[in-house]
Image (tube, rainbow, N blue to C red):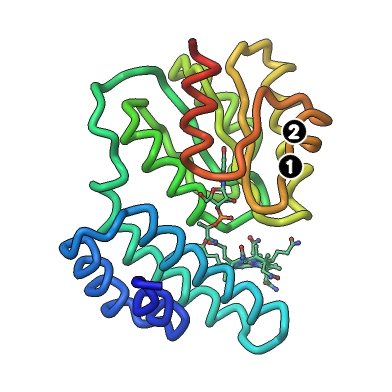
C-alpha cells in the first residue's frame, strides 16, 4: 500500500504527519481516491475495530477523527469535479442524536465539487430544522447521514416531518449502518453507501 504512511499516521493520531504525507502523496501523483480510501478511510475502519475490541476509547477515536480531518482538508480541492455552479440546492446534516460528521463532510465536499449549492447544518440536527431550512431555501434535496444504529430512527422521523410539512424535497440517506432495505422501509428517495455514490444519486434524482 503506497499510502501506508498516511494510514499509520491516522492510527497514532499524528495530525501534522497526516497532513504532510497527504500532500507528499498528492505531489507524487498518487490517485486521490487511493489516498482517501486506502489511507484515510481504511485507517478509520481500523480505529473502529480497535474501539470495538476495547483497545482504544472515545478520546482516541476523537483524536483519530481530527487526524483524518487534517488529511481531508488537503484533499478537498482535489475532490472537486470542477463543474459549473448551481445545479440545485442540497441541505445536508447528521441526524438528531448523532455527532459523527466525517462521512457527512465528505459527501458535502463532493456535492459542492459537483456543482451543487450545499447548506451544511452540521450534526445532531432535528427534523424540524431540516424542514424549516429546506422550505426557506427552496432546496431540491435533503441528505441525511447517521453512523449509529440508535440514531437511524431519527432519519424516519425527519422523513415524516418533511412529508407532514407538504414539502416535495427529495430525501437521500447514508452512513455505515444504513442499507437500501432500510431506505425503502422509511420511504427515502434514495440510499448510497459512499460519498461519490451520493453525488450520482442526486444527479439521477434531479434529471
Ligand atoms: Co463513533 N461509533 N461513537 N465516534 N465512531 C462508530 C460509528 C462505531 C461503529 C465504532 C465501533 O463500535 N466499532 C460505533 C457505532 C456502533 C453502532 O451504532 N452499531 C460508534 C459508537 C458506539 C460511538 C459512541 C456511542 C461511543 C461512546 O460514547 N461510547 C459515541 C456516540 C456519540 C454520538 O454520536 N452521539 C461515538 C463517538 C465518536 C467520536 C465523537 C469519538 C468520533 C466521531 C468524530 C467525528 O465524526 N467528528 C467517532 C468515530 C471517529 C467513529 C469511527 C471510528 C469512525 C467514523 C468515521 O468517521 N469513519 C466509527 C467506526 C467506523 O465507522 N469504522 C465509529 C470514516 C468516514 C469517512 O466513514 O462516516 O461511514 P463514514 O462515511 C462513509 C459512508 O458511511 C458514507 O460515505 C462515507 C464514505 O464515502 N456516508 C454517506 C456517510 N454519510 C452519508 C450520507 C449519504 C451517503 C453516504 O447520503 C446522505
**Can you give x and y, in whole percent of width and height, for residue 145 in the image?**
60, 44
Q: Which mark is residue 183?
A: 2
The answer to which image quadrant residue 59 occupies is bottom right
At a point 34% along the width and 34% down the height, the residue shown is 112
Q: Residue furthest front?
A: 1
Q: Residue furthest bottom?
A: 55
Q: Is residue 100 left or right of residue 164?
A: left
Image vertical order of residue 38 relative to residue 173, above or below: below
Image vertical order of residue 114 relative to residue 123, above or below: above
Q: Is residue 69 left or right of residue 198?
A: left
What secondary structure is found at the residue carrying circle 1?
A: loop
At a point 35% along the width and 82% down the height, the residue shown is 14
- In the picture, the quarter occupied by the N terminus is bottom left
What secondary structure is found at the residue carrying circle 2?
A: helix
Q: Label 1: which residue?
A: 179
**Can you give x and y, in whole percent of width and height, for residue 161 in the image?**
71, 25
CA gap, disc 1 and disc 2: 6 Å
Q: Are marks 1 and 2 in contact (CB under 8 Å)?
A: yes
Relative to the observer, which residue lies in front, 168 or 185? 185
Classify the position of ligand 1 by quadrant: top left, top right, bottom left or bottom right. Answer: bottom right
**Can you give x and y, in whole percent of width and height, for residue 169 in the image?**
58, 17
Amino acid at each position: 500500500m503506497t499510502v501506508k504512511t498516511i494510514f499509520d499516521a491516522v492510527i497514532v493520531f499524528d495530525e501534522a504527519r497526516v497532513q504532510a504525507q497527504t500532500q507528499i502523496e498528492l505531489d507524487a501523483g498518487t490517485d486521490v481516491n487511493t489516498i482517501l480510501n486506502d489511507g484515510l478511510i481504511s485507517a478509520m475502519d481500523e480505529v473502529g475495530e480497535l474501539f470495538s475490541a476495547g483497545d482504544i476509547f472515545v478520546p482516541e477515536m476523537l483524536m483519530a477523527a481530527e487526524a483524518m480531518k487534517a488529511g481531508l482538508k488537503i484533499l478537498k480541492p482535489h475532490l472537486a469535479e470542477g463543474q459549473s455552479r448551481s445545479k440545485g440546492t442540497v441541505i445536508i446534516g447528521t441526524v438528531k442524536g448523532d455527532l459523527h460528521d466525517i462521512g457527512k463532510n465528505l459527501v458535502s465536499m463532493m456535492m459542492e465539487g459537483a456543482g451543487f449549492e450545499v447548506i451544511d447544518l452540521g450534526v445532531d440536527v432535528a427534523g424540524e430544522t431540516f424542514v424549516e431550512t429546506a422550505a426557506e431555501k427552496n432546496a431540491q434535496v435533503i441528505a441525511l447521514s447517521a453512523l449509529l444504529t440508535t440514531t437511524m430512527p431519527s432519519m424516519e422521523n425527519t422523513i415524516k416531518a418533511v412529508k407532514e410539512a407538504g414539502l416535495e424535497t427529495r430525501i437521500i440517506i447514508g452512513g455505515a449502518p444504513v442499507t437500501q432495505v432500510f431506505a425503502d422501509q422509511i420511504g427515502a428517495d434514495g440510499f448510497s453507501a459512499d460519498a461519490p455514490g451520493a453525488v450520482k444519486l442526486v444527479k439521477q434524482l434531479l434529471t
